[in-house]
Image: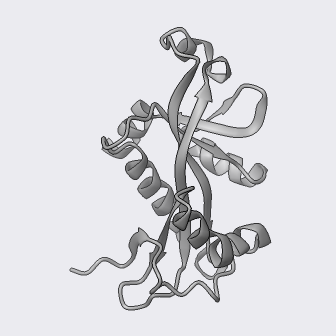
Amino acid sequence: MRPVYTIEPLGKIHDRAAFACGVEQLDHYIKVIASQDMRRRLAITYVMHRPESPTVIGYYSLSAYAIQTTELPDDLRRRVKYEHVPAAMLGRLALDRNYHGQRLGALLLVDALKRAVQTEVAVMAVVVDAIDDRARQFYEMYGFERLADHPNRLFITAKTIEQLIAG
């Protein structure tokens, strides 16, 4: 059985021109900035599309990040003996408005979390800057917690991700 959706790194074959999620900053990123960030090795953007069509219906970007230990909750801070801990930054996550309400945002998020904790590079957590309260609530629903001093900067530990993926 063919998958209903494919998620893969952004490439020249992917059609981003019609993408519209309703947030201009996110629309502009996929249409203009994402490929530049990939060429510069600043972030990797993964796109969701149907196998039979190159039209992008959703995307997210991942890049390297470091969390200052002082920003972590006390229980985690006590276990870490470093000034910074490695993390992956979920820089953006967006879904074309024609696909809202189909739980595809959750599918993109889980794919991003799986890729972030793969063993090629050690990360203790995944960090995201929620664009607004609605986005923050979406991430919190999946176990993300707020970092100190940043009301919309959230994180989820690799251990929590592994538990989430395991079901």
Could you say where residue 5 lies in the image, as x and y percent from the top left?
A: 39, 76
Of 78 and 135, nearer the camera is 78
Residue situated furthest left in the rendering:
1
Q: Residue at x 70, y 39 (%)?
A: 153
Up-down: is 106 above or below 13?
above
Of 97 and 44, nearer the camera is 44
Of 44 and 50, nearer the camera is 44
Relative to 8, is 14 on the left or the right? right
Could you say where residue 2 lies in the image, as x and y percent from the top left?
A: 25, 81
Residue situated furthest front in the rendering:
40
Q: Residue at x 61, y 12 (%)?
A: 74
Up-down: is 98 above or below 88?
below
Relative to 35, is 165 on the left or the right? left
Could you say where residue 51 lies in the image, as x and y percent from the top left?
A: 36, 84
Up-down: is 20 above or below 23?
below
Q: Quadrant of the N terminus?
A: bottom left
Q: Residue at x 57, y 33 (%)?
A: 66
Q: Residue at x 40, y 42 (%)?
A: 164
Q: Quadrant of the C terminus?
A: top left
Residue 103 seen in render = no
Residue 55 seen in render = yes
Dividing the picture into quarters, in which one does residue 165 lie? top left
Dividing the picture into quarters, in which one does residue 111 lie? bottom left
